[in-house]
Structures are given as C-alpha cells and as structure tokens.
C-alpha cells in the first residue's frame, strides 16, 4: 500500500547508498514523499458504509491532483469526489505535510473483492496506489465461535406477508437497528428504492418513531420503525423490493482509550452514514378464477352496493347508476364493474371518485363509480341483478356479493331535446320508387377475360406493325426482295391492261403485254435481268434455279405463242381472253413454285 | 331490366311500405331477402340503414349507411343519415388522420373507382401504342410521335400501378363497423391476451383480411385512433 517516489538528486551514483539506507532503517524515511491507500475496514457487512483514505505525505508542499477512483466490483461509490484534510507536523525541525483524500463507499455484494489502484497526479506525474483486498460478508453470518456478526447500525425491511395475492395489501416497514452508544439524530430516505410490480402508498405515521430495545444474538440493539408503506402487488410471480437507501445522522460516544476525545472535542462524534437494506423477494400467488361473477379486482374486506339516482326519468335526460365499494383493501386499484345494461340506453363517460385514508397500517376508504345513462325511448328499463366477486385474503376465497335488480321508468319527453331528436329523425328518410339495381359481382377487373384481351390487343398491334415496318425497310433497301415482292402485282396489272386491249381486237398489244407480264414476272421472282436476255435464256436460267419441268414447258410454250402471235396477229376475242386467263393461271402457279 | 329485376323492385316497394308503416323488423326481413338474392342498390342499403336506426341498432344502421354512401344516387342522403346516427353514439373514437398516400388512393378509389382508372389506363395505352406505331411509318413526325407516345404509355403505366395498388388494398382491407355495444380489442386472437383498447358501437375500423387469414372467428383490425388488435368477428359487420 506504499508507493516510493523518485530519488531526485541521488541519481545513479547514489543508488547504492539509498538501498543501504532503506535496508538499514526498514522504512522509506529518505524518500521524497509517501503515497498510501487504506480502508477503514477490511471485513465489511453488506450495506455497511466504509471509507477509503488516500494519503500523500512529504516534506514539502507539492502539486497534488485529486485521486481518481476506478469502479470497484461489489462496492458502490457514494461520491466520486473525495473529502480532503491536510495536516502539518514538525518533528526535529523537519516539516511534513500530509493530505488525506477520503472516499465514502458502501459494500454491496458478498465475497472477496479488490479495490483497484487509485491514480493520482503528483508534481505532474501519475502515481498509483497498491490494490487493497476486502471481504464483504453477509449480515448475520456466523463467526467462528457460533455467534452472528452484525454491524453497529443497519437497516432492514420487514414485510407482513411474504406470499400475497395480486391486489392484497401488505405492509413494508423500514426498521433501523443500532447498538447502544449510538444515537440517531436524523434520517432521510434517498431516491432509488424500486418497487416494480407494486402499487405503493406511504402510510401516514401518527407518531414519531420510538426506539425499543431488543437483544439480537446476545447483543443489545435498539430498533425503530422509521417509515411504513402499503404495497399492493399488481401481478403474480416473484416480485422484489430493492435495497432501501437511507442517510442517517448518528452521534457516537468517544472511545474510552482515546485520550484526546474529551480534551479537544465536545465528548461526542457526530457524522452521517449511508445505509442500505437488503432486497426482499416476495412470491405473489395468482388469484383464483371467479365463478360466474363480475370482477372488479377487489381484494380485501370490501362491501359493494349499487343504486339508481332516480326511479323515474324523462326520456333523453340522464340517470345515474352509482356503484360504491367501501371498506379495507385495495381501494385505489378497484376497477369499474362492467354491468349488463339494457338496450336503448345512451351511455356517457362514466365518472369515478375515491376517498382513501392512509392512517395506521391499512388503506381504507370508499370508491364510487357513476354510470351516466339516458333512455332513448319511453318504457321500463331493467338493469339485471349481478354477482360481484371480492377476494378475501384472510380466507383466500372469493366473497360473492349479489347486487339486486334495478329498474326505472322512462317517461315520454316534452322537452326541446326530444323535439330536436325528432327533427333529426325526420332527416332520415328512406328512398322510395324505382331503384338502380346491380347484380353482385365480386370479381376484380384483373380477373376478367376482357381485361386481358384488351391488354393483348395493343401488344398484337405492336408486333404486326413491327413486322410491317421491317418489311417496308427491306423493300426500300433490298432490290431483289422488292422485285419478288411486287412481281405478281405488276404481272396482274399487265394482264389487266392486256384485257383492256381485247375489245379493240389489238392482238399485237395483247400478246405483247402478256409476254411482258410473264417474262418480267419470272425475271423478278428469280432476280434475273429483264433486258438483254432471250426467252430461251430466261427459261434456262429459271430451270437452273429450280423451275419444275412442267412449268418450264408451259412458260416456254406461252412465251413462244405470245412472241409468234405478236408478229402474226390472229384469233378471236374469246381466244384472247382464254390466253389472258391462261397467263394469269400460269403466273399464279409460278408464284407457288419460284 | 328483366322480369327478375321487376320482382326485386316490387319486393323493395313492399318493404318501403312496411317501413313507412313503422313495421321495421318486417321491412328489414324483406330488404335482406333482396340482398340475399344478390341484388345491390344504394337505395336498398340506405333504407336498411334507416330501418335499423329505428330499432336502435345504430351500429348496423351505420354499416348500411356507409354502404349506401358508396353509391352516387344515395351519397348525399347517406351522409345525412350518418351524421344523424353518429350524433346518437355515446362514445366516439379519437381519429388519427390517415397517411397521405392512403388518403390519395382512397380518393382515387372513391372518386373514379378501380374500373374507371383501369379503363383510362388501357385507353392511354392504346393511344400511346398508336403514336409509337405512327412514328415508325411517319418519318416527318417521327420524333414528335415517339416522344408523345412514350409519355402517354408512361402515364398509362402509372395509372396501371395505381389500379394495382387500389386492387391490392381492396382485396386486403375491408371496412368494419362495430355492431355490439362494446368489445375488447386484444393484442392476440385470444380472450386471454392483453386488451389493447375497447371498441364501442359504431366505431369503424380497417379489417386486414390478409393478416386474419387462418384465424377462425377473429379479425385483425386497425382502429381509427391508429391502434391495432384482434376483434371477435361476431362483433363486426364488414364490407
């Protein structure tokens, strides 16, 4: 727990001398300063407060920073800023200054723990203390001789029922125990007591806490109940009341063997200590199911009554159904009963009021639920009888209270309100006469055939147009394709022109045109030159390109005939028409084959 | 209008007479028989709403008036009726405004309807395709036709997307009206689970059919105050 500082002017040469002096004296008297950390107790009870002192002493005033305390396992640091005290002593003309920094700590977890090194800046250099081992023992743990060890002052939470049901009131009392010779001057609860799963009501203490003497494990203690709370568990299962933190002002008698106790001081030692109780875990058992009854979450010695504010009421005016829950129990937690009400009533926002007394050790009082209703139509309204369940924690059973049937008479109204309602009713007129009818069809538009047909049509048009566009582009750029494409059309046109010459009996023109039609058609279909070749050459080339023999002969015969008659025109109009028809047929045949 | 149509019109007239004679329950039976035969009419729903309001079943009345509100010929009358019915409910729900896109699609669905939006989308598609085809064959207007056609097809695609979203919403969600005096809205489809809220008669809620699939007797709903939960389907009327 000591830290040796620098040797300063000794340097390397004086190292041996320093070591010799240290060995000789057994203390670091020649050191420039001393750093030391100590704890007030090395064996501490859980919840007990103890102190950690960090002392820096030396022969001259130094630049000392505040020590930094790291987190300590199992220990809660009450304040990270330490209190500071300084003393100066002069012994044999040598002045020593000592500064002590004190941290207040509270033991939390049982076990062996280590207070890690505390960092402190001395003359701009960082120093650390040695770690300190402490042991935290459970309160009441047996000592070696079989007796229980208890601290001089400690807190305890006592609960009057460890296995309550949800909604049952239990009383948690905060008891302070302290040994003879300790006088408690004041106490102040500090924030941090968690009561998760409980509804908490502080009970009003009628008198000041009175201390009583008790003997615990052979040791005389004084005890006082400081605060009492009424707790209502809100759910079943294991619920825990956390550590209760309390700051207590105490005054202790000075130790008899302290020679300066009565010389300098007033004869007493007054200080504040922070205490924490141990957590308490309760096992909350679930409420049994109520049989055929209205539940209101009522637990305790409670009475339930209900009544109507009147037995006769004018239609449209409000009437009150008042339910009262009275007695000792969980009055603040009682819920509005859900009664069956007849049809034809308008319900308004219900009202709720309570009057709770927190004196003594019980919560008692009265809670009233008021249902505001208005009859819509004249007549007798019957509110049926109800069975209400109230759980009695003493007998651990439900008490069933039967609420009798209530009835009231609603009289016809003559007020403006009813007139207004009638006026509004007049606005609700049915539709008469011919109505517009439709059959129920639930199919979505996306499930109908015509929708998909309509959707496909533009796609089909797009495809057709695309093909057509491609064809047109080819006709523009591909001459051979263009000639093939238009071959028949041109040939037919020429045949039609030839037919025009029939009435004129112009055999020369007729056969010349037919020759041209046939010749050009074959040349266009086979991409052969139109000029510069004879009929024979045309047919030969067509034959080379796959013209069937039969068609070859027919074509040759017709071309020869046209050529012959062109130069020796003979024949009747009938013959002309036959030849034109024959040419057209041949063209059609050729189209299928070339 | 065929013979069967005349038959339901005569039943409708008969029911109207009963309604005027204050024989509300008899009129309801007759109106419902028309509906059970598969005939729909704004007037039929409106008169059912009026009849139910007279026998103090305000939740059911509201349900039919809401249905009547979706028909153009009875829209105004249904709104007046709804105002009257809503004023008679003792409890009203806090209303969380719907999200902007929900409001937008609801407006489209109510103002134009799914059919109309789809047909407009198809029309624009045809125009767009025609313009694109025109651009292939009319070199002189090629750019103009192509750009216009592309824009019109884009517009058509947007309308198709709207139609698909509306169709999805209509298939997935429905409108539910609370017809019991009050019912608990549970966190899970079980009466043992935690109660999220209480729904009172006349509360409207959005029913999620998709989420409710496979869960018998329960519907997953979104209340008007934005809370979600499960409601016993017997407490609701849904359209």
Image (cartoon, coloured by chain):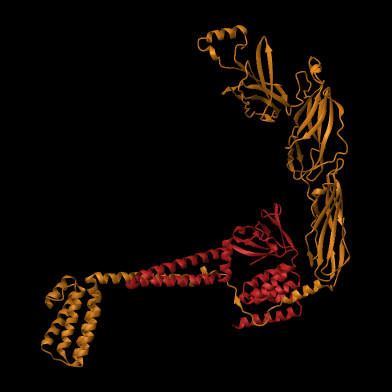
Chain colours: A orange, B red
Residue at image position (22%, 88%) is A499
Q: Quadrant of residue A4?
A: top right
Regarding residue A137, the answer to whether it shows in the image is no
Residue B27, percent across and down?
72, 77
Query: Is residue A294 depicted above or below A479 in this figure?
Result: above
Identify the image quadrant of the N terminus of chain A: top right
Image quarter (top left, top right, bottom left or bottom right) of the C terminus of chain A: bottom left
Q: Nearer the viewer, residue A245 or A2?
A: A2
From the top left corner, tell me how far across and down residue A331 is, in percent: 83, 48
Q: Residue furthest front?
A: A93
Residue visible at 29% across and 71% down in the picture: A471
Q: Position of residue A558 (x, y in %)?
A: 16, 82
Q: Quadrant of residue A284?
A: top right
When the figure is inspected, residue A61 is found, relative to residue A433, above or below; the finding is above
Q: Is residue A226 left or right of residue A553?
A: right
Q: Is residue B239 above or below residue A64?
A: below
The answer to whether residue B207 is visible is yes
Q: Residue at x 61, y 12 (%)?
A: A28
Residue A526 in which image quadrant: bottom left
B207 with respect to B130 (left or right): right
Count numbered badges in the picture.
0
Left or right of residue A89: residue A181: right
| x, y percent for residue A114 | 64, 24
- Comparing B160 with A23, the one in front is A23
Left or right placement of residue B209 versus residue A278 in this view: left
- Position of residue A560 relative to residue A255, above or below, is below
| Relative depth, front residue between A33 and B186 | A33
């Amino acid at each position: 727990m000591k830290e040796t500082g620098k040797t300063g002017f000794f340097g390397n040469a004086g190292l041996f001398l320093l070591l010799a002096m240290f060995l000789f004296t057994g203390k670091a008297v020649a050191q420039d300063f001393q750093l030391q950390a100590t704890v007030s107790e090395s064996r501490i009870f859980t919840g007990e407060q103890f102190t950690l002192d960090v002392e820096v002493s030396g022969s001259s005033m130094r630049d000392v920073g505040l020590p930094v305390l790291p987190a300590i396992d199992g220990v809660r640091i009450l304040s990270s800023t330490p209190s500071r005290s300084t003393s100066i002593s002069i012994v044999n003309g040598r002045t020593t200054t000592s500064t002590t920094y004190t941290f207040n700590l509270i033991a939390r977890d049982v076990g062996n723990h280590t207070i890690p090194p505390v960092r402190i800046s001395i003359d701009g250099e960082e120093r650390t203390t040695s770690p300190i081992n402490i042991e935290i023992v459970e309160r009441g743990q047996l000592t070696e001789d079989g007796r229980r060890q208890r601290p001089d002052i400690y807190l305890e939470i006592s609960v009057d029922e460890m296995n309550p049901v949800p909604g049952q009131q239990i009383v948690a009392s905060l008891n302070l125990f302290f040994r003879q010779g300790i006088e408690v001057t004041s106490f102040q609860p500090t924030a941090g007591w968690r009561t998760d799963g409980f509804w908490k009501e502080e009970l009003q203490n009628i008198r000041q806490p009175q201390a009583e003497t008790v003997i615990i494990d052979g040791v005389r203690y004084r005890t006082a109940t400081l605060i009492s709370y009424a707790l209502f568990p809100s759910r079943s299962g294991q619920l825990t009341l956390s550590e209760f933190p309390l700051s207590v002002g105490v005054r202790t008698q000075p130790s008899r063997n302290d020679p300066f106790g009565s010389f300098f001081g007033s004869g007493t030692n007054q200080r504040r200590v922070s205490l924490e109780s141990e957590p308490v875990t309760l096992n909350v058992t679930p409420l049994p199911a109520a049989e055929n009854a209205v539940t209101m979450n009522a637990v305790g010695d409670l009475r339930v009554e209900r009544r109507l504010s009147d037995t006769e009421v004018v239609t449209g005016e409000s009437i009150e159904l008042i339910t009262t829950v009275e007695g000792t129990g969980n009055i603040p937690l009682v819920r509005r009963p859900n009664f069956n009400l007849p049809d034809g009533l308008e319900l308004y926002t219900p009202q709720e009021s309570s009057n709770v007394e927190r004196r003594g050790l019980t919560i008692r009082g009265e809670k009233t639920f008021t249902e505001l209703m208005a009859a819509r139509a004249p007549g007798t309204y019957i509110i049926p009888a109800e069975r209400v369940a109230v759980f009695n924690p003493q007998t651990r059973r439900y008490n069933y209270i039967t609420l009798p049937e209530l009835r009231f008479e609603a009289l016809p109204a003559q007020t403006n309100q009813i007139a207004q309602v009638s006026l509004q009713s007049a606005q609700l007129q049915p539709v008469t006469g011919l109505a517009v009818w439709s059959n129920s069809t639930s199919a979505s538009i996306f499930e109908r055939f015509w929708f998909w047909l309509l959707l496909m049509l533009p796609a089909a048009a797009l495809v057709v147009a695309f093909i057509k566009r491609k064809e047109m582009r080819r006709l523009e750029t591909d001459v051979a394709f263009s000639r093939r494409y238009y071959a028949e059309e041109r040939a037919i046109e020429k045949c039609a022109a030839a037919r025009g010459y029939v009435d004129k009996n112009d055999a020369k023109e007729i056969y010349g045109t037919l020759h041209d039609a046939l010749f050009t058609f074959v040349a266009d279909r086979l991409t052969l030159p139109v000029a510069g070749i004879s009929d024979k050459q045309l047919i030969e080339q067509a034959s080379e390109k796959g013209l069937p023999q039969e068609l070859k002969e027919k074509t040759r015969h017709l071309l020869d005939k046209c050529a012959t008659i062109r130069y020796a025109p003979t024949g009747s109009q009938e013959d002309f028409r036959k030849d034109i028809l024959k040419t057209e047929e041949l063209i059609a045949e050729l189209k299928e084959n070339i | 209008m065929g013979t069967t149509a005349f038959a339901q019109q005569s039943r409708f007239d008969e029911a109207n007479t009963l309604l005027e004679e204050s024989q509300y329950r008899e009129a309801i039976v007759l109106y419902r028989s028309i509906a059970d035969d598969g005939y729909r009419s704004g007037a039929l729903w409106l008169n059912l709403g009026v009849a139910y309001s007279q026998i103090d079943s305000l939740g059911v009345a509201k349900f039919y008036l809401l249905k009547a509100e979706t028909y153009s010929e009875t829209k105004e009358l249904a709104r007046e009726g709804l105002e009257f019915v809503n004023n008679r409910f003792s409890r009203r729900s806090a209303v969380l405004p719907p999200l902007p896109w929900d409001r937008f699609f609801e407006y489209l669905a109510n103002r134009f309807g799914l059919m109309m939006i789809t047909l407009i989308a198809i029309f624009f598609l045809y125009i767009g395709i025609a313009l694109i085809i025109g651009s292939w064959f009319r070199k002189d207007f090629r750019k103009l036709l192509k750009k216009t056609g592309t824009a019109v097809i884009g517009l058509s695609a947007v309308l198709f997307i709207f139609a698909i979203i509306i169709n999805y919403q209509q298939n997935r969600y429905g409108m539910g009206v609370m017809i019991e005096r009050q019912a608990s809205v549970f966190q899970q489809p079980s009466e043992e689970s935690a109660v999220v809220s209480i729904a009172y008669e006349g509360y409207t809620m959005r029913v999620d059919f998709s989420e409710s699939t496979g869960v018998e007797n329960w519907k997953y709903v979104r209340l008007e105050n934005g809370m979600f939960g499960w409601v016993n389907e017997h407490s609701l009327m849904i359209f």
